[in-house]
Image (cartoon, grey):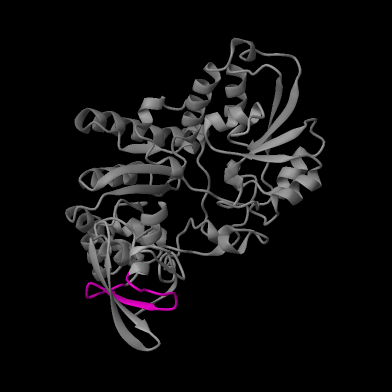
């Protein structure tokens, strides 16, 4: 096994040791380098011996550096290997229910624990053999983000439709015993893994010292489920029952351990028609990328930034700059209440809920609004500009989920569409046309 070095940073330890672009890395300090995890762990020393291939000949380069300074080698891919794909057939798989026309990247079913380490992606561990589990422990690769769904092995196998799913609790115990920390997620389906099954899952996870938190997320269903498992969304009373279980455990664990551990996603509170928890109840917002606490943090940040405005700006005026905020159906009432509580002088804001016809009306989150639905909804709305959350766009890019460039969408709408960061400060800056929006 070897890895092509595509470039070497100038003046880096590798460059000083004579490593060149085109060389192939074989070993570091005598150990085979499998991927970026091995590369980073084995290069975190002051003196690193690199075994290379150059033109078919083996050579050695000794790199001297600060203990945690990078070697300076760059490779073809960030992970130094291909992405590991999903081997599950989950009843609730979102990829299986995508409509035609989405970006091709959305159809990729990856399940790579290394992406969990690098980016916080949730993984199932069903494609992680024992030897790889030991490598995770040996390299101290944490924290990881793990999709649990159910602690009961029969139920987890039924939900994920692979016998490999049965081993999860054994895997989590080994990780925990090996000192690896992990955050957990359970995608809940009505009548399947909630109720008593959820109680069992929470009870099993809190017994593991490595488990840091558990996010509860309601199943996401599109309108493209012909031939798939008969699942449905949560009714308000069912969502409240999930919150009741979570709240009972949260109170118990806060008293016993100083952490609430169980964190329902914002969507559960919206589906239940229940108020969001206070800012302090989200602790360190450790599960925010799973939709846990986004709305509460947005309101907390917006209010703090709003209170720093001059008094003349913290009042309601009948007219001014006409701004529309386009969002998913579920977030619209929250945003209307936010802007009603904290008005801004000289800015007239409309909050426009965009019904999702691309995925289906059951999809109500802002991050899955497409350009087509956005344009159809906002055409004819009297405003000078349209604000959207950056979550509607590809990470670091400018294309919406139906693969339409943002500039093209703005041209079709006939007015600027402005993506806004997720923070409350970013929203306030965008409303006020400040540069750091």
Residue 255: % across, % down:
22, 27
When the figure is inspected, residue 298 is found, relative to residue 93, above or below; the finding is above
Which of these two is toward me, 57 or 15? 15
- Name the outermost residue toward the left: 177
Quadrant location of the N terminus in the rendered image: bottom left
Does the rendering let one see residue 353?
yes
Residue 243: % across, % down: 40, 33
When asked about the image quadrant of residue 335, the answer is top right
Query: Relative to 242, is 322 above or below?
Result: above
Query: In the rendered image, which quarter is residue 46 located in?
Result: bottom left
191 horizontally vs 347: left or right: left
Q: Is 278 placed left or right of 38 in the picture?
A: right
- In which quarter of the view is residue 428 placed? top right
Taking the spot 65% from the left edge, 49% from the top edge, the residue there is 360
> Quick check: is 90 in the magenta stretch?
no
The percent coordinates of residue 433 (x first, y second) are: 67, 29
Q: Which residues are magenta?
A: 17-33
Specify the farthest residue to the bottom.
Answer: 56
The residue depicted at 55 percent of the width and 20 percent of the height is 306
- Along the line of sight, which residue is nearer the eye, 230 or 150? 150
Residue found at the far top of this picture: 311
Judged left or right of residue 322, residue 400 is: left
The number of callouts visible is: 0
Q: Residue at x 77, y 32 (%)?
A: 384
Of 367 and 219, nearer the camera is 367
């Amino acid at each position: 096994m070897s890895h092509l070095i595509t470039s070497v940073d100038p003046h880096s330890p590798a460059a000083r040791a004579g490593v060149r672009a085109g060389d192939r890395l074989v070993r570091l300090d005598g150990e085979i380098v499998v991927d970026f995890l091995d590369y980073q762990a084995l290069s975190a020393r002051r003196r690193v011996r690199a075994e290379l291939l150059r033109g078919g000949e083996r050579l050695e380069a000794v790199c001297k550096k600060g203990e945690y300074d990078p070697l300076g080698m760059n490779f073809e891919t960030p992970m130094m290997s291909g992405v590991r794909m999903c081997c599950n057939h989950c009843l609730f798989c979102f990829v299986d229910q995508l409509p035609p026309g989405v970006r091709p990247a959305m159809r990729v079913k990856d399940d790579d624990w290394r992406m969990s380490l690098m980016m916080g992606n949730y993984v199932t561990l069903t494609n992680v053999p024992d030897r790889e589990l030991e490598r995770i422990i040996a390299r101290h690769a944490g924290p990881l983000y793990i999709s649990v769904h159910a602690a009961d092995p029969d139920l987890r196998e039924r939900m994920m439709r692979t016998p490999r799913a049965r081993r999860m609790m054994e895997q989590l115990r080994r990780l925990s015993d090996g000192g690896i920390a992990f955050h957990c997620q359970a995608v809940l389906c009505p009548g399947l893994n909630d109720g008593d099954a959820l109680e069992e899952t929470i009870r099993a996870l809190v017994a593991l010292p490595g488990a840091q938190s558990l996010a509860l997320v309601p199943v996401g269903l599109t309108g493209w489920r012909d031939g798939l498992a008969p699942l449905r969304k949560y009714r308000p009373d069912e969502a409240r029952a999930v919150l009741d279980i979570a709240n009972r455990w949260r109170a118990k664990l806060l008293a016993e351990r100083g952490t609430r551990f169980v964190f329902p996603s914002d969507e559960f509170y919206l589906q239940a028609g229940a108020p969001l928890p206070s800012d302090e109840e989200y602790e360190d917002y450790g599960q925010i990328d799973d939709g846990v606490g986004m709305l509460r943090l947005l309101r907390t940040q917006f209010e703090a930034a709003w209170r720093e405005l001059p008094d003349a700006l913290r009042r309601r005026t009948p007219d001014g700059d006409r701004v529309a905020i386009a969002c998913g159906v579920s977030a619209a009432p929250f945003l209307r209440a936010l802007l009603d509580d904290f008005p801004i002088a000289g800015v007239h804001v409309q909050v426009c809920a965009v019904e999702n016809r691309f995925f289906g009306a059951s999809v109500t989150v802002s991050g899955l609004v497409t350009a087509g639905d956005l344009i159809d909804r906002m055409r004819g709305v009297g405003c000078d500009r349209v604000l959207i959350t950056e979550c509607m766009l590809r990470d670091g890019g400018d294309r919406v989920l139906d693969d339409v460039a943002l500039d093209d969408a703005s041209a079709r709408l006939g007015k600027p569409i402005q993506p806004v960061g997720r923070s409350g400060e970013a929203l306030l800056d965008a409303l006020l046309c400040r540069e750091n929006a």
